[in-house]
């Protein structure tokens, strides 16, 4: 959960600096992108992420075996031409399980990003900053309530209490409607884990966007736009949103690393997406008996942990690296 | 400033009520009726009814809620469902104290190592030192704690035999070292990065240039002007970093066998010990809210440029 | 019967320490009795046959009074040089928080392992699993087998030095049965006594079946001649408590319990530790150990053992190879742990489609290649089960014809399974109801064998089954209310060495332990006759027939028996004996260093 703190670390209530304001007129994004692409590290991180996410998204095409295909005649084998990363104790292909585990992480991070940060966080932030007043107050207060939970406790609590309810309801629905396979597809798990991770992502983003909008409102270009009667939606989407995109991207980048880390942590505890759906945290849970045998496995059979650990580490590392680079690009002061 | 503080203080109880209400409601709709579980196969409507009556579970939710809050204010969080006859306060007290000390140790390590390291990296910008430090912190930050903890045990306890494997012996005991380092590790990374960024920021400020121009020694400039001002933004994340340590604490308490509160929280959630869960959520939220409050006020005090509306 | 609904296999082989700590905390049984629940957890352990007990024995259940326990006779007298030279020291091990320390509420191995060292009853199981006198000196059984007259030993004392009389037993048993005690097993262990069930049902507060003749004589009348009755008295539900102690302590009397075991409770800090100290008023030879320290805070057992933080641990799969290497220092400490008397299985609710069809259940049994799973996934640490009674358990005959998949001839075995499926009324996948196997816990490997079983069903029979994992609390609740269609992740461990403990309790149609609502008139009548059959050989035979019938009707899919496991114990710990059932044993342990 180490990474969780990162998103909060981004200085959220600071206004945009004057420097960026000047750049606005010269297509700041093209310039930012150009600066980003000149950073070798950023490019490398993006490449790795691209590969990992690509592998996850296209898991059905890049896997070599069915990830749940049990083959008791080939258990715990080392890497071979047939099993690139070997097999686990049920003879399942580790490479394919890693790829499918990545898909789980990809889905969860995207759900987290889209629903949490982008839709909820950005929208509420824009509206709260723009309208202020009671709306601002109530959203901020609500957010503070959620944020004042120790998030781990909240996540575990939600995953442990809501999931069984939702699964039962869905099963009843399946029986009633005759539609099969909703539960077994893992959709419910994605939904629950997505919800459980929401509090992690939306409030930080919302506070950041709101802060930015509050300062932008005082800028001359906003005032003049208001003076010439620009409509509210146009004001929000054409004038305010583009100006807060930079910080949004930086925060989202850190946030994605955090969400990925949390998803893996939850599955490690056995509270994430449930088997048979493969997940990276669960693979480690499985090998180390939820940590109890972790020292023994590290000591005697570290190779069993290598693949999932390397992927998890690379994933989070690259998100943080990218976030860093983006931060440099969009926040020139700390360059 | 005063008005802001007062407002924050007044708002805090409201926040806590909302938090407790939320947990209470979640408990209501969570699965697993504690009475059914307690009775097992001896379950009969009659017995369940009697037990519910005994435990006051039959009253309407608002009544139970207010009764609970009333007692909680007096420090009475009720009795655990699982550990019969034991008060929640009695159960949690010692564990909170253990975890608090562990947290503090982890926190001290984060700050004690992270801040100087970040400052050092910033002052060496342009040399190989800076990117190396940044890279190391990123590598450590991405390491999942459930691997980091056993790796430390393997290295320092088993292979090198420098430190004990597990247990708890209080704050001044060698057994605290490994868990504190594990908990503090992500914090070190975060602190280093924050301190580095903020130092770079300050180094570019006019007053630093002015100080140098005045002919002050480089050491004085750095200590008096740079370090001090750079610390201010780092303050803001102290509250958050405490919250962020919780996840780490959970794994650490499991793997190092520490009788702390995080593991107990997980146990309680799985066994649906709602009096304990509610109390923990309340205590956790209170701690977090108070920590943020203190940080906010501190922030306002040290940096007069900040104004609150 | 949560009690014995022992998830021992589970906890032992596939759970890990924290899980034990976590999920089971509340209500569930857990933990290996021998290496400490936590340790064993990761351990895949177990086998044993060190237990040379006579398996022919229905006799176990009918111990003649003259069968004296050498240990206890020599006991109180031998506080001599022998004691002095061995006394002292602390024995340290991992354990988990017990769901209860009240003997009358105990239903699980974690609690039982502690309670048998703090309390005791009229009789106990010796480490050789014989029923031997404990607080009773002798007993007589009337010719019709219904009236037991126990004579207590002289000068019995509680740990606080106060005397024990027959009236204490009467009070204790009536207290155990009282609904306010909330024992879920009082009817199981004491229900044979006339009048106890009325107390359990709340219709009475005292039992006519328990009569105090004088201070040292207790007469117990049971409802029928049940030879296994005496065996049930070894379970904590029949232990003696001190009335003043229990009544004064209220809900928390177990914080300062007054017992009769070799140890007294010195300190209990939830989630941290339990400390036992020697009972100076013990009625037999006093315990050698000054203290026993049960570490409840968890940790990595192997590492703690290596750094001398604990004295005993199980060995998990990951360490097995290393400790078996003769060059490894730990190899000197390696010991074999006998298998527990336990079985793990997948249960079917025989009232819910499609498990209401015997042919369907048989096909599911026939399709599972247990040998292959045992060998490739569990490295031979489990033994495929084709019957119900574990090897070496009284009544185990080895001649049960199981529904077996022959690993040497997979094609024929698969064909046979398919042929049986074809005869089932659920042969058509289109109309077959959906199958959900529910397993307990949250995430984690406990599901692996169930996953593999489901995979074999799919491959061999084309039968699709979903696996649903729910938390322990919900699982137990659904299990007890018989809501589950099929359930995995379960094991059953014996509480006393009598086949009744498995075959009657788990399969009689009216037994609360029969979670699958299995109902067979044949089985019912066989186990009912066995209850009162006086001839041991005949009794065994009745149980054998019942077991065969249960297997043939495929009430369960039996999975594994325990096999011998590996453990580590420090060389200076002497006379620690691993047993397949929980028995008091720490009183004999001593430290030589």
Image: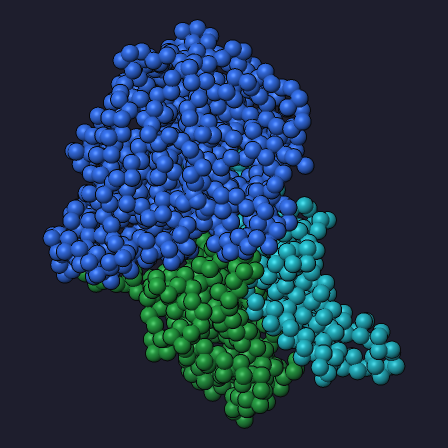
Q: Tell me where residue B59 appears, x and y as whole percent.
A: 38, 37
| Nearer to the camera, C574 or B42 | C574
**Residue C432 seen in render:** no
As drawn, the residue found furthest toward the top would be C214
Quadrant position of the C terminus of chain C in the picture = top right
Residue A157 in the figure: left or right of residue B171:
left
Q: Tell me where residue C520 appears, x and y as whole percent.
A: 18, 36
Kindly identify the residue that appears in the image at 69 percent across and 67 percent down: B114
**Chain C rendering hue:** blue
Q: Tell me where residue C111 appears, x and y as whole percent.
A: 47, 35
| Nearer to the camera, C521 or A187 | C521
Kindly identify the residue that appears in the image at 33 percent across and 48 percent down: C384
Residue C518 in the figure: left or right of residue A263:
left
Render colour scheme: by chain
**Residue C453 seen in render:** yes
Chain identifier, colour green:
A
Residue C107 in the figure: left or right of residue B181:
left
Answer above or below: position of A56 versus B102. Answer: below
Kindly identify the residue that appears in the image at 68 percent across and 46 percent down: B170
**Chain B rendering hue:** cyan
Q: Quadrant of residue C322?
A: bottom right
| Nearer to the camera, C85 or A279 | C85
As drawn, the residue found furthest toward the bottom would be A26
Q: Number of marks in the image? A: 0
Q: Quadrant of residue B300?
A: bottom right
Kindly identify the residue that appears in the image at 20 percent across and 49 percent down: C361
| Nearer to the camera, C321 or C559 | C321
Q: Tell me where residue C417 appears, x and y as whole percent.
A: 19, 55
Answer above or below: position of A58 versus B26. Answer: below
Quadrant position of the N terminus of chain C in the picture = top left
């Amino acid at each position: 959960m180490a990474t969780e703190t990162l998103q909060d670390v981004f200085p959220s209530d600071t206004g945009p600096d004057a420097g960026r304001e000047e750049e606005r007129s010269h297509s700041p994004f093209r310039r930012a992108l150009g600066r980003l692409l000149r950073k070798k590290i950023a490019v490398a991180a993006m490449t790795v992420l691209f590969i990992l996410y690509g592998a996850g998204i296209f898991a059905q095409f890049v896997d070599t075996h069915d990830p749940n295909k049990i083959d008791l005649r080939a258990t715990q084998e080392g890497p071979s031409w047939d099993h690139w990363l070997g097999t686990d104790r049920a003879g399942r292909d580790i490479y394919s399980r890693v790829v499918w585990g990545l898909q789980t992480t990809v889905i969860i991070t995207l759900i987290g990003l889209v629903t949490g940060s982008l839709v909820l966080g950005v929208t509420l932030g824009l509206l709260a900053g723009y309208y202020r007043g009671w709306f601002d107050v109530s959203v901020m207060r609500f957010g503070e309530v959620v944020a004042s939970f120790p998030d781990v406790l909240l996540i575990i609590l939600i995953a442990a209490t809501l999931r069984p309810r939702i699964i039962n309801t869905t099963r009843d629905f399946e029986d009633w409607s005759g539609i099969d396979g909703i539960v077994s597809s893992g959709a419910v798990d994605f939904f629950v884990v997505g919800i459980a991770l929401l509090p992690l992502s939306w409030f930080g983003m919302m506070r950041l966007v709101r802060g930015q909008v509050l300062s932008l409102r005082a800028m001359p270009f906003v005032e003049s736009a208001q003076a010439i009667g620009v409509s509210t939606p146009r004001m929000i989407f054409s004038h305010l949103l583009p100006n807060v995109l930079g910080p949004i991207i930086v925060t989202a980048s850190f946030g994605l690393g955090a969400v990925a880390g949390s998803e893996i942590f939850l599955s490690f505890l056995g509270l994430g997406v449930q088997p048979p759906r493969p997940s990276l945290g669960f693979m480690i849970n499985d090998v180390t008996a939820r940590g109890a045998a972790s020292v023994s496995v590290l000591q005697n059979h570290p190779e069993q942990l290598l693949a999932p650990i390397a992927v998890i580490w690379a994933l989070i590392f690259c998100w943080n690296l990218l976030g860093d680079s983006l931060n440099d690009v969009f926040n020139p002061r700390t360059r | 400033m005063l008005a802001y503080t007062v407002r924050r203080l007044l708002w805090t109880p409201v926040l806590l009520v909302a938090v407790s209400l939320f947990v209470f409601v979640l408990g209501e709709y969570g699965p697993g009726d504690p009475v059914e579980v307690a009775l097992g196969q001896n379950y009969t409507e009659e017995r369940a009814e009697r037990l519910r009556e005994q435990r006051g579970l039959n009253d309407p939710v608002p009544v139970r809620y207010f009764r609970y809050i009333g007692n909680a204010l007096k420090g009475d969080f009720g009795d655990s469902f699982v550990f019969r006859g034991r008060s929640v306060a009695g159960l949690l007290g010692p564990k909170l104290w253990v975890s608090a000390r562990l947290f503090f140790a982890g926190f001290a390590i984060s700050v004690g190592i992270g801040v100087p390291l970040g400052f050092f990296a910033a002052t060496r910008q342009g040399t190989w030192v800076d990117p190396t430090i940044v890279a190391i912190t990123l590598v450590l930050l991405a390491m999942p704690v459930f691997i980091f903890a056993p790796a430390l045990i393997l290295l320092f306890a088993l292979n090198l035999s420098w430190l004990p494997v597990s247990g708890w012996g209080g704050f001044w005991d060698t057994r605290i070292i490994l868990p504190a380092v594990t908990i503090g590790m992500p914090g070190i990374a975060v602190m280093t990065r924050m301190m580095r960024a903020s130092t770079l920021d300050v180094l570019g400020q006019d007053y630093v240039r002015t100080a140098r121009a005045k002919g002050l020694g480089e050491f004085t400039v750095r200590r008096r002007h740079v370090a001090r001002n750079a610390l201010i933004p780092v303050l803001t994340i102290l509250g958050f970093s405490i919250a962020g340590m919780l996840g780490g604490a959970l794994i650490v308490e499991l793997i190092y066998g520490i009788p702390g509160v995080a593991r107990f929280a997980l146990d309680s959630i799985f066994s649906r010990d709602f009096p304990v869960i509610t109390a923990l959520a309340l205590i956790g939220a209170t701690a977090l809210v108070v920590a943020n409050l203190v940080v906010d006020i501190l922030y306002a005090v040290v940096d007069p440029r900040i104004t609150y509306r | 019967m949560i009690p014995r609904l022992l998830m021992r296999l589970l906890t032992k082989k596939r759970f890990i320490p924290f899980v034990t700590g976590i999920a089971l905390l509340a209500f569930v049984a857990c933990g290996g009795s021998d290496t400490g629940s936590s340790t064993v957890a990761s351990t895949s352990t177990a086998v044993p046959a060190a237990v040379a007990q006579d398996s022919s024995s229905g006799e176990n259940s009918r111990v003649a009074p003259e069968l004296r326990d050498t240990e206890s006779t020599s006991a109180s007298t031998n506080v001599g040089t022998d004691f002095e030279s061995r006394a002292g020291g602390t024995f340290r091990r991992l354990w988990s928080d017990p769901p209860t320390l009240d003997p009358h509420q105990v239903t699980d191995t974690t609690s039982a392992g502690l309670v048998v060292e703090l309390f005791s009853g009229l009789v106990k199981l010796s480490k050789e699993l014989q029923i031997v006198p404990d607080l009773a000196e002798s007993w007589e059984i009337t010719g019709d087998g219904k009236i037991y007259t126990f004579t207590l030993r002289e000068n019995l004392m509680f740990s606080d030095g106060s005397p024990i009389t027959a009236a204490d037993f009467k009070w204790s048993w009536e207290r155990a049965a009282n609904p306010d005690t909330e024992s879920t097993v009082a009817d199981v262990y004491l229900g044979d006594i006339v009048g106890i069930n009325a107390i359990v049902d709340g219709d009475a507060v005292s039992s006519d079946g328990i009569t105090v003749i004088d201070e040292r004589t207790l007469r117990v009348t049971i409802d029928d001649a049940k030879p296994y009755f005496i065996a049930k008295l070894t379970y904590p539900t029949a232990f003696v408590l001190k009335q003043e102690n229990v009544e004064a302590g209220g809900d928390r009397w177990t914080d300062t319990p007054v017992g009769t075991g070799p140890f007294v409770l010195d300190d209990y800090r939830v989630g941290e530790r339990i400390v036992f100290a020697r009972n100076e008023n013990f009625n037999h030879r006093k315990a050698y150990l000054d203290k026993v320290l049960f570490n409840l805070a968890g940790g990595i057992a192997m590492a703690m053992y290596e750094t001398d933080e604990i004295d005993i641990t199980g060995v998990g799969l990951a360490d097995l190879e290393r400790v078996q290497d003769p060059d490894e220092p730990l190899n000197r400490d390696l010991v074999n742990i006998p298998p527990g008397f336990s079985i793990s299985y997948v249960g079917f609710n025989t009232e819910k489609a499609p498990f209401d069809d015997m042919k369907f259940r048989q096909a599911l049994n026939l399709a599972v290649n247990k040998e292959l799973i045992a060998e490739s996934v569990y490295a031979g640490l489990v033994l495929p089960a084709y019957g119900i009674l574990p090897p070496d358990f009284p009544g185990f005959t080895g001649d049960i014809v199981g529904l077996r998949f022959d690993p040497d001839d997979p094609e024929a075995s698969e064909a046979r399974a398919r042929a049986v499926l074809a005869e089932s009324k659920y042969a058509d996948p289109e109309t077959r109801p959906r199958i959900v196997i529910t397993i307990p816990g949250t995430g984690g490997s406990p599901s692996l064998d169930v996953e593999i079983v489901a995979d074999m069903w799919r491959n061999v029979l084309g039968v699709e089954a979903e696996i649903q994992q729910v938390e322990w609390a919900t699982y137990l609740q659904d299990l007890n209310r018989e809501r589950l269609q099929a359930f995995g992740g379960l094991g059953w461990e014996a509480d006393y060495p009598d086949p009744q403990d498995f075959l009657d309790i788990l399969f009689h149609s009216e037994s609360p332990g029969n979670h699958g609502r299995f109902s067979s008139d044949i089985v019912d009548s066989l186990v009912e006759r066995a209850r009162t059959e006086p001839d041991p050989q005949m009794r065994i035979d009745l149980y054998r027939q019942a077991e065969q019938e249960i297997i043939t009707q495929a009430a369960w899919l039996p999975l594994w028996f325990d096999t011998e496991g590996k453990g580590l114990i420090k060389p200076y710990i002497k006379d620690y004996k691993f047993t397949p059932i929980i028995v008091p044993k720490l009183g004999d342990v001593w430290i030589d260093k």
